[in-house]
Image (spheres, helix red, strand yellow):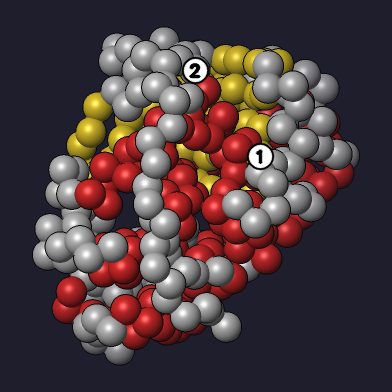
Amino acid sequence: MNPAPVHPAPVHAGPRPAAAPVIREPLHAPVAQLVRGGVIEGIHYGSVVVLGADGGVELQLGDIEAAFYPRSALKPVQAVAMLRAGLPLDGELLALAAASHSGEERHLAGARRILDLAGLPEEQLRNTPDLPYGPAVRDTWTRHGRPASRLAQNCSGKHAAMLYTALLNDWTLDDYLDPEHPLQRAVAATVEDLTGQAVAQVTVDGCGAPLFSVSLHGLARAVVRIAGAAPGTPEARVARAMREHAEMVSGEGRDVAALMRAVPGLVAKDGFEGVQVAALPDGRAVAVKIADGADRARVPVAAAALARAGVDPAALTAFAGAPLLGGGAVVGRIRPVRALDPIGAVAHV
């Protein structure tokens, strides 16, 4: 049950953040190999950062300080910004506000509930119409001849929450995606507060919302702030909602939900173009960017990074990557580089 709307708290600017990360060609490094029959057939480049409980960098590969776009991995931070601005959601609806959902009926129903709380119609959404993100859901959707819709698009929970936040603050609704809108300025301020650095660049994400460029290191710091926050804070509310309603953050059978179920206390979020971030309440965290955007490398690399952070490898074996088949037989796999997984602990437990 969600609380009744309350008068929103004012949005306060935090201390001035550090300088923005440099916009440059990232100096990515090999992070995973495609091994077939004992021969390295392909190499995925990228960047990885592992933070220890003291906040220090315990491992880095590639370029963790260059400006990059976190894509949907930034949604937990956007959700914190909305709570700071008075959004009164918790539980599954708050999880949906931080989601890249599969378009299941529970996701669509949740987005409608957020709009109903705001007293707004679906037509008020400004995200890009799309088919459901989950393959099985999308196949069923198209089989029944249903068209692309704003509600089915994977960011509809976030957009519904943005509208609700704007309404509560008496901000204009039609232009809520404008980077200069008070809502988006509040999001930018929260991004800078939690990452500890100024935004390097602003563009438009696939859903139409402003997208803020930070560093991979900054993204890891931000999600640490969320995962380890004091109870009752906006950050802690987002972390609790994501942990308790992991399938609302993603969907049935999705790796992000499975990862949060497998590792107690973990807050995890994926993003398009090979982005993954995950953090534990004690301050340990990992962030991954796969240079070519390949999903097949994102999860095995993130699992290996979590093992390097001290997570029990036995809890991560399901995330070692799908086997590579040849003629129906297993002939290889995606293998994180030895700097990440020196003894193959994740894959061979």
Q: Quadrant of the C terminus?
A: top right
What number is the disc on residue 24? Answer: none
Residue 269 placed where, x, y %?
A: 53, 48
Tell me if residue 177 comes above or below residue 158 in the rendering.
Answer: above
Tell me if residue 339 comes above or below residue 33 in the rendering.
Answer: above
- 212 or 146: nearer the eye? 212
In this rendering, position of residue 143 left or right of residue 268? left
Which sits earlier in the primary sequence, circle 1 or circle 2? 2
- 303 or 49: nearer the eye? 49
Question: Is residue 277 visible to us here?
Answer: yes
Residue 338 placed where, x, y %?
A: 71, 17
Nearest-to-viewer mark from 1 and 2: 1
Q: Residues within 10 Å of mark 1 (few under 14, many from 20)?
A: many
The amino acid on which the numbered mark 1 sits, given as a three-letter code, is: Ala
In this rendering, position of residue 86 left or right of residue 185? right
What number is the disc on residue 64? Answer: 2
Q: Quadrant of the N terminus?
A: bottom right
- 200 or 299: nearer the eye? 200
Q: Residues within 10 Å of mark 2 (few under 14, many from 20)?
A: many
The amino acid on which the numbered mark 2 sits, given as a three-letter code, is: Ile
In what element is the residue under mark 1? strand
- 61 or 88: nearer the eye? 88
User: In which quadrant of the rendered view does residue 148 lie?
Assistant: bottom left
Q: Residue furthest bottom?
A: 144
Q: Which residue is mark 1?
A: 279
